[in-house]
């Protein structure tokens, strides 16, 4: 992160706490505000290959996202987690070390997951 980052650093808010996010951070960030983006993008193709290999090894055994009410169709949004609100998911990270390394290269990473959305479905807006 740039030291001149324009967004306030605040305590992480997690959806499982309930309620609505009322912090100062925007719903999305501008890529130019993060000096690490170009290095991360340069690693993307090797990450993608490692991720696809790993996901294929799961044979479709990917759990539905836990907040099922956010998806317009039941079980259409599935997620495979590597870091869950700061906690490492050992089975996933140990099985896919290249994927974990990519996620860990993102400064300040708190959660790292891969989402799969089956169509036709939509995900409701959320933070």
Image (spheres, rainbow, N blue to C red):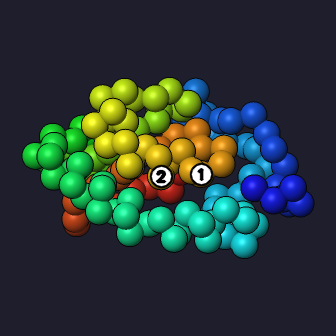
Q: Where's residue 19, x and y in %?
A: 61, 34
Residue plotted at (59% across, 51% down): 106
Q: Is residue 119 above or below residue 85?
A: below
- Quadrant (top left/top right/bottom left/bottom right) for the N terminus: bottom right
Q: Is residue 73 above or below residue 82?
A: below
Q: Where's residue 38, x and y in %?
A: 61, 71
Q: CA distance from mark 1 to mark 2?
A: 7 Å
Mark yes or no: residue 6 visible.
yes
Residue plotted at (57% across, 50% down): 105
Pick the front one: 125 or 58:
58
In the rendered view, does 19 fall on the left or right side of 49? right
Q: Where's residue 79, x and y in %?
A: 32, 45
Q: Is residue 16 above or below residue 108?
A: above
In the rendered structure, find residue 102 and report the number of the disc placed on it: 2
Pick the front one: 112 or 50:
50
**The residue tagged with tag 2: helix, strand or loop?**
helix
Residue plotted at (37% across, 27% down): 90
Name the residue beneath numbered marker 1: 106
In the rendered view, does 67 fall on the left or right side of 8? left
**The residue tagged with tag 1: helix, strand or loop?**
loop
Residue plotted at (79% across, 49% down): 24
Does the CB distance between marks 1 and 2 fall below 8 Å? Answer: yes
How many residues crowd around disc 2 within 10 Å: few (fewer than 14), some, or many (20 or more)?
some
Mark yes or no: residue 68 visible.
no
In the rendered view, does 75 fall on the left or right side of 100? left
């Amino acid at each position: 992160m740039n030291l001149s980052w324009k967004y306030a650093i605040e305590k992480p808010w997690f959806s499982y706490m309930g309620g609505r996010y009322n912090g100062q951070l925007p719903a999305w960030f501008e890529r130019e505000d993060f000096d690490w983006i170009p290095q991360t993008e340069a690693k993307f193709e090797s990450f993608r290959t490692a991720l696809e290999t790993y996901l294929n090894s799961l044979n479709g055994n990917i759990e539905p996202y836990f907040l099922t009410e956010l998806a317009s169709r039941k079980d259409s949004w599935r997620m495979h987690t590597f870091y869950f609100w700061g906690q490492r998911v050992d089975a996933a990270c140990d099985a896919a070390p290249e994927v974990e390394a990519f996620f860990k290269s993102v400064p300040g990473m708190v959660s790292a997951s891969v989402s799969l959305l089956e169509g036709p479905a939509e995900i409701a807006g959320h933070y």
